[in-house]
Structure formats: structure tokens, C-alpha cells
């Protein structure tokens, strides 16, 4: 596969330990929604795939999973990178996706366009990896739910404008629903389906 | 045996991958763990592998630990609250061998604690992960053995059968006759088996700062409680949940708030009660706490009785 | 310290040394080598390959030695090793029609094309202990009769079920389907109801004793299927692997398998003409009992799809598939020897409390009534 992609950007240097470190960041991010967890590892994936989103997908996806990517990411370079570093099958129907990669947050499909799982098997839903601008500025949200002792506030720059409304609609489906991993420039924030989300400005 | 806590960088000496499992298997388990955390109390199916130790001996917990463990972790393994029970020793040795990971017996020093049947007495902290070995993950199993049926009950949140069973207990015995693996309700939704911990430990499940992961290898299920998840032991208004209490303090450290093992000390049925959490008991004694029977003579006696293996270097004699 | 950590570690280490000693047995008896097990205890090796779910005669023989002849323990060793092997893909379906047959019998026709070939069977041996085996002495080589076709490749022996199918008397074999991937119960957790591919996988690696008992139960009326042993054939088949990057199949070699095609009770309705139905068993090596039992249970597990009511244990997918794996079963049964004193303590406390309440209640009732009068009786 490398042969027809001579310029293919690198993946993890030390796959075993970097993937473990990245996985723990994702686990902690989803276990404690709203906390920013540093992710490093992959440095220069093909644009517009971000380094953080690339690390997360390389950590979690493989030939037993499927990936849907938005129009912004559907470039030959990104597709080749995903195919080489994960072996996952790319799908065009978001309902078939184990993972979704979204670079253009403003035009993200409604969450219920993805696999939502079933009441019998709610774990079969899509995990959405949404590239955002960061967690230092932007819209502020008040979070509550499992993983949060009382409430927790988080700022997200570059999220869809209706993130709170999307969260409410997703939460109403519980136990079905998607889980979100927001991928900033150096860190991730998890918003699992259990998190209650309220915009506070 | 508190091993040094410095990160270990030397490669594991076995020829197997770090922490035994191949990376593809780890990814599969990791994906299941993420969904388990996102749906607290829901049993996520996963393709548990045949492990090099028997099913029922912690293969689920071992797979979860192997999937999360990193070279910077400090691992503690307990069985019945003790670090020195043979299966805990064996599992700890497995990870020392395959992951070259730092190990400890101190609850406070551990980042990952794999446990069978207990939650440590010392309150867990943020950043710690407790991995439970689970034999039967399905809380409804003993009421309805068919998974095809119990899955539907969970999907519909139809737990009437469980409430009927618990109420029958009260009618028949005056008590809910469940002393361990006492079912809990997670965030008002899923009824969950907390693994066979004594119900004494149930209150520790709720609003814990630590992440709690549950692995059932033979039954191929993973479930989780994120930190600060509300966990309620099932009960009735007129029969509220009551954790087991002990009449006597620990004979060695004098603790009155810990779970106790009953130790039969002679053939006339004389008994003493000592902490099941050996780290907790040792730490209390190191801090100067003394129980009624904490004289050195007695401690020596117990040590000799428990350490049944002779260490006299006698050759092992082959069978004639 | 209350119990020293080192104690447990030393105990385990010494127990393992003792185990190695007992495995070796008396030192004045020559140590067995795996080649001897592979060649002379070959049916044990076959069983271990099946229940260990890995075709490797040398490894299975070594596992039998290491396990001191405990075949479930040996299968467990093989399974744990199997877990660590890379998975390259699935072979092409083997063609048992092209088998180099060593044994082939049918209970449904007195004579048939290809004939009845007894082969190396215990059938018709009188089960008299052969004391000559206890002494030295070479076993004579078997007699060889030249096959009528001479040295050329053996003609394919038609399957009995094919003969029936020509008349339409037996249900059609399922169409082979290259599109849908065959399930793999080691890569995805088994869901009930399971397809026949996964059921047969679980039965092939299932415990021989469990399948035997279940198959037997169907014969005794617990889910009767009126079986006839249409054909049992044992022999070598080629295994081909199609590597996606090559685009053609590469032969990996030949393995011995046993196959049983049971012909069962007919099904039909006012619309569909009655036909016989199939039960199928296939496993590594010479494992006739296993594949016969497997075929009985396979057919019993098809009860629902053939329109029958599930009433007996052997027909119950969830019961059969959940309990067939002896590595799982032995682990969970034997885990009861692990310490349970925390849970037992909790039960003790409850039983003591309930007994105390019981005593108090009896005493209260006794005092309520005329205690003296009752005591006088």
C-alpha cells in the first residue's frame, strides 16, 4: 500500500505505547466529560485532518471498524492515510459508521444521521470525532451527568452553533445515541451521550 | 513488596506483545470500554479471547487491565481484599512478566487496581482505575437464565422480576437474602451486577472519584461506572438497603469500619475477625493502631498457619 | 505482616515444581516424547486439536504431554496459544467429496457406489484387553489390496446425500455464498439466535462428552430426530487458501477430517413435498463419535427453522451453545476452589442473623402460648 502512496504521512512512531497513551486520554475524556485531555503522537497527517483527530482514529480504528468522513476530509490524501494507518473501511452512509470524522463542524450532519445503536445494543452507535478550534475560548457550556461531581463548565471554539440543542436531542434517545470526542489542536474533550449540555454564553 | 515506582522502560521478557494482548485485540477491548463508559451500567458485548489462565479466574479483568495498562502505571492486584492470595499473586506476576509494570500493595500508590470480590477500604482518588473481575455480569441471570430474555428486560428497563424476587426474600426471610453481588441501579437506568463484592462495599460504588471498569471474560461482557456516577443499591422504602456491619473490631488493627474475615484459630471453633483488606490493616498497624489480639505471638502464629508451604529446602521426592 | 506476599509466590513456584515432577513420574521409566503421543495416542491428539480449535498435531501432542494426559487441560493450552497467532483469513471450503477416503460407511444402503470401507475402526473389535500390547513386539503392517483403479488417483466417491438429492428426497444443501463472510465466534461475541455457521463452529470445538450426552438424549426422545447415519467418511482433504493479493488459491496441504451426514426425519407441509432433513458433523482427525454426536445436535438445533417446537435441551440454542465449550466450563466450575471467604462471610452473617431472629420468634411464640402446658407434654 505504501508503494502507491510514496508521500504518505507517518503514523505513530511507537504504536504500542503511543496508542495506549492516546486511548487513556480518550477513556478519561469520556469518563470525565468536559475535561481537556492532552493528545500527542501523530504530528503531520494530511490536511485538513488534524493531528489530534488522526491520533484518536489511529488508536481506535482497524479493519473491524468503519469510518465515515465529512466532505472536507474526503480527499485522496486523507483517504489513503486512513486506509494505510487503520485498515478501516470507508463508508458513505453515516448510519454504517463506527467512527465519524468531521473537519467542517459548522456543516456537521445532525447526530441522528449516524448509527444510534438500538435499545438492545446501544453500544453499536457511532463515535463522532469532531475537529474544533480549541477549549480556551468560544461558546461556554454548563455540563452535568455521570463523570461530573456537580457541574463542570467548558468552552469550545469552533463547535456547531447548535451543540447544546444537538446534545439535548441526543440525550433524549438514551440509552441510544452518539458519543462525541471534540478534537482541539492539542487536546480532546469528551461528550458522551449521558452528558447534559447547557449553553451559558 | 512495594516495587519502585519509576516508569519501566525495559521490554517485557516474554516474546509476547506489551501486556500480552496483540494490538488488534486491545483496540477491540478499548472500543468496548469507551462505549461502556458512555452507557454506565450497560453490558457491552466484546470478543473476549482465550487467555492463558482459566475462565472464571479473572480473564475478563485481565483483558481490561491489559487493554488500559501503560508503562507508567503502578498496578495493584487483590483477591478477597488481599494482595497475597494465590490468584492475586499469579495475576500480578503475569503483568510483571508481560508488561514489566511497576506493582504495589499500597492502595494509595496504585494507578490501576485489579480486584476480585472487594473494593479497597481506603477511599479511591481521582485518576485511579479499579478493574473488577466479574463471573456473571447479568444481574437477572438467577431469575431468568436466558440472555435472550434478560437483554430485552434491560432494553425495556423492565426490572419487575428483580423487585419481585427481592420482595419475596423479605416475605420469606424478613431480609433481602442477598449479601454479595447485591444488584444496583445506575443513574436511574440500568440494573447492574457489581460483581461478587459483599454488599458492605456497595456504597463505595456510588460517586467514587475513581473510574470503575468491569470485565467478564467467559461471558464476554464489559461494563463501567465513570467517576461520580450515582449508584443505588436496590431496596424498598419499608426495607432500606443496609450494609453488613460487624459486631467486633479487627483483632489486629482495631478497625471498626472495615470488612472482616473470620479466622478459625483452633479446632474448638475459636474465632477471630481480621480486616480482609490487608493493606488497610497493615497501614493502620504501622500507624500504631492495635486490636485486642495484636500481640506479636499471635501474629507470628497466623503467619505460620497461612504460609503453609515449607521453606526448608527439602528436595521434592519423586513418586516411587 | 499477617500473611507474607512471598509465601504465596513461593507456594506457587513450589507447586509448579511438584507438578513437573509428577508429570514426569518414576524416573526409571523412559520419558515419553511428543512424537510417540502424536503417533500412538493419535485419537487423543485429534480430540485436543478439535477442542483446542487449532490443527497442529505436534503442538497438540506436546500439550497432551504437558497436561499429563488431561485432554481438557491440553485443549486449554492449545487455545491459549491459538489466541496469540495472527489470523490471515479463511481457507476455501474443503471438498470432502474429493477426500482420499480411508473409512466410509453408510447405514442407509447395503451397497452403494464407492462401497463400504471399514478402515481403521474399533467397530467389531472384541473389547478384550490385549495383554500382548504390554510387552515388546512390532505390530505387523496392514495388508494392502490394490484398488481396482490401479495406481491412478482414486475416483471420487459420491456422497449418499447426493444420491438422495438426485431424487429430490432430501432437502437441498445450502447454497455456498461467497459474498457473506463466514462468522468467527472468536472475533465477535456469539449472539443467540446464531446462524448455522457459528453453531457448527461452536459444536466442532465443543466438548465431545457434552455433545455425546446431548446427541444421546435426542435418541431417547428428548427432541427426537429419527436419524439414520447416511454416511460417515474419514480421510485426507486438501486445504486451499486464497490470498487476496494473489487472486488464486494456494494449497496449504492435506488434513484428515471426519464427516458425518445424518439423514433425519422428513419435513414438509401441504404445500411442500416431504423430504428428509440433514444434520451435519465435521471435525479434525478421526473423531467418529464426535461428528456423529455433532450431527445429531446440529439437526436438533435446526428444530425451529424446520418449523418444530423447541422442547428439549438439545434443541435449545442458547442452552447448547452456551455450555458446549469445555475450556469455559472447566474454568468456571473449577473457579469455585478460589477463595470465596469474603462472600461466604457475608452469607454466614446473614444466616446467623436469620437464625437468631428465628430463635427469638420461636421463643416469643412459646411465651405467648401457655408455655408450661406445652413444656409438660
Image (cartoon, coloured by chain):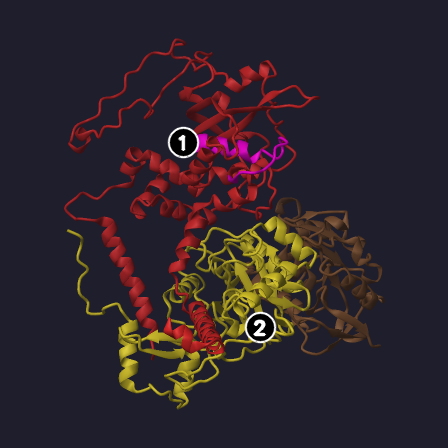
Chain colours: A brown, B yellow, C red
Asked if residue A119 is positioned above or below residue B184 in the image, the reply reads above
Residue at x 57%, y 36% (from the top left corner)? C197
Q: Residues within 10 Å of mark 2 (few under 14, many from 20)?
A: many
Picture quarter containing residue A158?
bottom right
Q: Chain of mark 2?
A: B
In the image, which residues are magenta? C287-313
Q: Is residue C137 left or right of residue B38?
A: left
Asked if residue A121 is positioned above or below residue A31 in the image, the reply reads above
Quarter of the figure that contains the N terminus of chain C: bottom left
Residue on which the image places disc 1: C289
Q: Chain of mark 1?
A: C
Residue on which the image places disc 2: B205
CB contact under 8 Å: marks 2 and 1? no
Residue A185, visible in the rendered structure: yes
Q: Give x and y (percent) for residue C244.
A: 59, 36
Magenta span contains residue C296: yes
Q: Camera-side residue: A56 or A32?
A: A32
Q: Residue furthest bottom?
A: B288
Residue A59, visible in the rendered structure: no
Secondary structure, mark 2, is helix
Q: Camera-side residue: A179 or B161?
A: B161
Secondary structure, mark 1, is helix
Residue B264 is marked as none
Q: Give x and y (percent) for residue B232.
A: 62, 71
Q: Are marks 2 and 1 on the same chain?
A: no
Q: Give x and y (percent) for residue B55.
A: 45, 54
Q: Camera-side residue: C11 or A89?
A: C11
Q: Residues within 10 Å of mark 1 (few under 14, many from 20)?
A: some
Amino acid at each position: 500500500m505504501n508503494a502507491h502512496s510514496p508521500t504518505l504521512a507517518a503514523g505513530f512512531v511507537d504504536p504500542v505505547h503511543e496508542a495506549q497513551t492516546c486511548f487513556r486520554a480518550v477513556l478519561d475524556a469520556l469518563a470525565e466529560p468536559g475535561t481537556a485531555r492532552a493528545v500527542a503522537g501523530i504530528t503531520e497527517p494530511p490536511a485538513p485532518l488534524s493531528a489530534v483527530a488522526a491520533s484518536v482514529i489511529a488508536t481506535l480504528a482497524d479493519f473491524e471498524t468503519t469510518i465515515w468522513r465529512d466532505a472536507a476530509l474526503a480527499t485522496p490524501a486523507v483517504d489513503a492515510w486512513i486506509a494505510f494507518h487503520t485498515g478501516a473501511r470507508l463508508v458513505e452512509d453515516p448510519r454504517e459508521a463506527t467512527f465519524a470524522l468531521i473537519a467542517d463542524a459548522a456543516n456537521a450532519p445532525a447526530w441522528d444521521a449516524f448509527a444510534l445503536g438500538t435499545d438492545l445494543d446501544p453500544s453499536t452507535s457511532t463515535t463522532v470525532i469532531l475537529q474544533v478550534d480549541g477549549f480556551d475560548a468560544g461558546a461556554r457550556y454548563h455540563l452535568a451527568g455521570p463523570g461530573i461531581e456537580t457541574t463542570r463548565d467548558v468552552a469550545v471554539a469552533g463547535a456547531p452553533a447548535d451543540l447544546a440543542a444537538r446534545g439535548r436531542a441526543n440525550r433524549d434517545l438514551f440509552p441510544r445515541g452518539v458519543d462525541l470526542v471534540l478534537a482541539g489542536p492539542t487536546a480532546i474533550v469528551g461528550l458522551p451521550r449521558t452528558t447534559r449540555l447547557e449553553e451559558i454564553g | 513488596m512495594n516495587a519502585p515506582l519509576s516508569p519501566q522502560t525495559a521490554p517485557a521478557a516474554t516474546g509476547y506483545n506489551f501486556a500480552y494482548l496483540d494490538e488488534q485485540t486491545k483496540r477491540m477491548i478499548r472500543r468496548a470500554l469507551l462505549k461502556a463508559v458512555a452507557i454506565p451500567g450497560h453490558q457491552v458485548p466484546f470478543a473476549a479471547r482465550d487467555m492463558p489462565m482459566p475462565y472464571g479466574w479473572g480473564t475478563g479483568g485481565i483483558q481490561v487491565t491489559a487493554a488500559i495498562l501503560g508503562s507508567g502505571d503502578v498496578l495493584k492486584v487483590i483477591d478477597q481484599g488481599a494482595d497475597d492470595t494465590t490468584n492475586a499473586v499469579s495475576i500480578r506476576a503475569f503483568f510483571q512478566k508481560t508488561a514489566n509494570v511497576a506493582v504495589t500493595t499500597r492502595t494509595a500508590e496504585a494507578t490501576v487496581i485489579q480486584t476480585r470480590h472487594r473494593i479497597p477500604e481506603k477511599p479511591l482518588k481521582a485518576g485511579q482505575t479499579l478493574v473488577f473481575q466479574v463471573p456473571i455480569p447479568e444481574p437477572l441471570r438467577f431469575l431468568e437464565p436466558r440472555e435472550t430474555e434478560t437483554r430485552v428486560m434491560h432494553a425495556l428497563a423492565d426490572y419487575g422480576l428483580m423487585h419481585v424476587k427481592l420482595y419475596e426474600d423479605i416475605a420469606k426471610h424478613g431480609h433481602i437474602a442477598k449479601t454479595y453481588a447485591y444488584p444496583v441501579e445506575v443513574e436511574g437506568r440500568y440494573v447492574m451486577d457489581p460483581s461478587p463484592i459483599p454488599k458492605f462495599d456497595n456504597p463505595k460504588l456510588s460517586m467514587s472519584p475513581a473510574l470503575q471498569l468491569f470485565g467478564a471474560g467467559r461471558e464476554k461482557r464489559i461494563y463501567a461506572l465513570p467517576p461520580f456516577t450515582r449508584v443505588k443499591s436496590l431496596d424498598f422504602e419499608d426495607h432500606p438497603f443496609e450494609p453488613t456491619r460487624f459486631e467486633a473490631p479487627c483483632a489486629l488493627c482495631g478497625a471498626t469500619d472495615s470488612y472482616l474475615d473470620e479466622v478459625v484459630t483452633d479446632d474448638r471453633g475459636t474465632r477471630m475477625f481480621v480486616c480482609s483488606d490487608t493493606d488497610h490493616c497493615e497501614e493502620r498497624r504501622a500507624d500504631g493502631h492495635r486490636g485486642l489480639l495484636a500481640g506479636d505471638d499471635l501474629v507470628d502464629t497466623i503467619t505460620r498457619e497461612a504460609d503453609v508451604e515449607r521453606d526448608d529446602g527439602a528436595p521434592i521426592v519423586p513418586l516411587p | 505482616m499477617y500473611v507474607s506476599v512471598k509465601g504465596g509466590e513461593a507456594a506457587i513456584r513450589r507447586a509448579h515444581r511438584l507438578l513437573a515432577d509428577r508429570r514426569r513420574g518414576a524416573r526409571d521409566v523412559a520419558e515419553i516424547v511428543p512424537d510417540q503421543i502424536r503417533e500412538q495416542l493419535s485419537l487423543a491428539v485429534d480430540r485436543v486439536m478439535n477442542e483446542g480449535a487449532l490443527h497442529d498435531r505436534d503442538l497438540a501432542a506436546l500439550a497432551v504431554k504437558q497436561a499429563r494426559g488431561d485432554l481438557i487441560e491440553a485443549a486449554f493450552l492449545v487455545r491459549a496459544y491459538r489466541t496469540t497467532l495472527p489470523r490471515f483469513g479463511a481457507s476455501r471450503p474443503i471438498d470432502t467429496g474429493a477426500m482420499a477416503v480411508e473409512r466410509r460407511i453408510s447405514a442407509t444402503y447395503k451397497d452403494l457406489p464407492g462401497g463400504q470401507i471399514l478402515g481403521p475402526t474399533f467397530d467389531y473389535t472384541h473389547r478384550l484387553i490385549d495383554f500382548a500390547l504390554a510387552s515388546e513386539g512390532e505390530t505387523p503392517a496392514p495388508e494392502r489390496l490394490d484398488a481396482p483403479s490401479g495406481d491412478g488417483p482414486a475416483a471420487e466417491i459420491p456422497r449418499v446425500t447426493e444420491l438422495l438429492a438426485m431424487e429430490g428426497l432430501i432437502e437441498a444443501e445450502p447454497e455456498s455464498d461467497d459474498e457473506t463472510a463466514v462468522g468467527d465466534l472468536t472475533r465477535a461475541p456469539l449472539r443467540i439466535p446464531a446462524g448455522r455457521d457459528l453453531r457448527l463452529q461452536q459444536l466442532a470445538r465443543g466438548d465431545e462428552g457434552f455433545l455425546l450426552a446431548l446427541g444421546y438424549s435426542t435418541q431417547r426422545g428428548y427432541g427426537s430426530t429419527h436419524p439414520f447415519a447416511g454416511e460417515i467418511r474419514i480421510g485426507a482433504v486438501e486445504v486451499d487458501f486464497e490470498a487476496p493479493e494473489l487472486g488464486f488459491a494456494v494449497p496449504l496441504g492435506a488434513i484428515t477430517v471426519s464427516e458425518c451426514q445424518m439423514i433425519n426425519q422428513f419435513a414438509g407441509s401441504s404445500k411442500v413435498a416431504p423430504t428428509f432433513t440433514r444434520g451435519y458433523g465435521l471435525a479434525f482427525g478421526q473423531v467418529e463419535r464426535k461428528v456423529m454426536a455433532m450431527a445429531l445436535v446440529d439437526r436438533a438445533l435446526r428444530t425451529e427453522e424446520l418449523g418444530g417446537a423447541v422442547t428439549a435441551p438439545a434443541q435449545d440454542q442458547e442452552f447448547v451453545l452456551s455450555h458446549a465449550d469445555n475450556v469455559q466450563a472447566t474454568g468456571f466450575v473449577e473457579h469455585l476452589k478460589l477463595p470465596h471467604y469474603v462472600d461466604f462471610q457475608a452469607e454466614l452473617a446473614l444466616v446467623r442473623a436469620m437464625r437468631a431472629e428465628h430463635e427469638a420468634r420461636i421463643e416469643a411464640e412459646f411465651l405467648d402460648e401457655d408455655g408450661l402446658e406445652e413444656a409438660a407434654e
